[in-house]
Image (cartoon, rainbow, N blue to C red):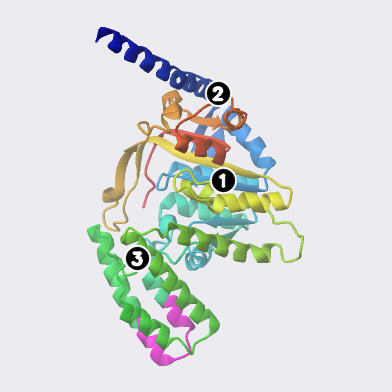
Amino acid sequence: MLKSIITIACLCSLLAQPARAQDTTMTRLLRANVYPLTAAKAQLSGTGWERLQASIAKSQFVLVGEDHGMAQIPQFTQAVARELQPAAFITEIDRYQAGALTRLTATPGPPTAYLKASPGALSFFSWEEEYELAQQLRAQKAQIIGIEQVGVFTPGRFFEQLANQVRSKTTRIYLQQRRVVYQQHDNEQSRSGGHAYSMVIQHQSALDSLVAITKSESPEVRRMVQEYLLSYLIYKDQVKGLDSHQARVNLMKRNLLEALRPLAPQPGQPLPRLLFKFGASHMARMLSPWAGITDVGNLAQNLADVQDARSLHLLVMGRQGTQVGGFNPDDPSKNVVPFDISKETYLKPFADITTGPAWQVFDLRPARRALLNDKLKLTDQMLVALLLGYDYFILIPNATASHS
């Protein structure tokens, strides 16, 4: 019996040794390629920022993958935008929200009245720091492009725009009535913390009526209706726990290709510099670390490859702190939730190195080369996908929630 116990103990020890070797190699590579960055809102400095500046200068497309709802990330993106000077900013909102954002940022100040009437109608850009990012981009003459499905918070504004485009008076009155009903319902959901938004709980009869009443309208109106129907199906499947993520990503890819066509109208004409900002799941090259499918970030790299250019993929997250977790328009404190990623297995190697107030800029490319050359062995597939998908990981020691 004692011999068996000793044998098992020896086997366990041998099995554990490669894991320790992996940890040592990974930690050594991270420590050798991490650089401090000091941030004062949108003003960045330090060796970490200098390395990012050098990489941005060599890139045609820069993609920022984020954990939503942190004030520091849009401020970081402001600094990136100043360096890149993009012709267009492509982001995780729909084209109608992008149009509204473009109009609103043409005038100074926050969109207080707009958001009071329609809380959350600008999605992430309903938050102060995100809106300031949009203002800066418009001041830089960058076009704002949204490629998402119709936003879940936006039926009131969507039906208002739809009503303004129809020719039939009867149809206009119907759409305006729907606008009021949907906006009131969604405002109540935002205030109560509910999730039964109009977009999610549509009745089939209402959708059938929308199609029927607009069938004689312009091609643009009919297109809007079809986009609304597709968005409803994506949200409905999400609520039911069905796999609608692939359909959503496919839609974003189609919308991206359509939106980019005017930026390179002649065959063979290269695309201009572009800045992307989406949730981290969308911005990696190859497979998304979180969803396991090729996403918008992979398409962006393919587009860069076609014109012999580079895409730069930046992952930006907070180690711990607070972030936005709701859209209550009356009490912003209800929208703030704490978080701590240091216990996530695939992020722990980075979190363990991050100490002190300075941000940490991890250059992931040496670790990726070691991985591809079989000099680094990793069993955590999330960590593998992160190294393959991103060039830099910018980790904020203590992040704070974006402001309403």
| Residue at the image point whose x is 43% and y is 82% from the top | 163
| Residue at the image point whose x is 38% and y is 40% from the top | 400
Element class at badge 3: helix
| Residue at the image point whose x is 37% and y is 49% from the top | 403
Dot 1 crowding, Cα within 10 Å, few <14, some 14–19, many 20+:
many
Q: Farthest residue toward the top?
A: 2
| Residue receiving disc 1 | 286
Q: Residue 64's x, y, as percent?
A: 53, 46
- Which quadrant would residue 321 be assigned to in this image? top left
Q: Earlier in the sequence, mark 1 or mark 2?
A: 2
Element class at badge 1: loop
Q: Residue 165's x, y, as percent?
A: 49, 82
Tell me which amino acid carries mark 3: Lys
Q: Residue 322's x, y, as percent?
A: 34, 40
Left or right position of 272 against 242: right
- Residue 390 shows in the view: no
The CA distance from mark 3 to mark 1 is: 28 Å
- Residue 171: in magenta span: yes
| Residue receiving disc 2 | 29
The CA distance from mark 3 to mark 2 is: 44 Å
User: Which region of the structure is painted magenta?
Assistant: 160-176
Cβ–Cβ below 8 Å for labels 3 and 1?
Answer: no
| Residue receiving disc 3 | 236
Q: Quadrant of the N terminus?
A: top left
| Residue at the image point whose x is 62% and y is 54% from the top | 140
- Residue 310 shows in the view: yes
Left or right position of 131 against 343: right
- Above or below residue 354? Residue 306 is below
**Of the numbered discs in the image, which one, if any, rests on residue 148?**
none
Element class at badge 2: helix
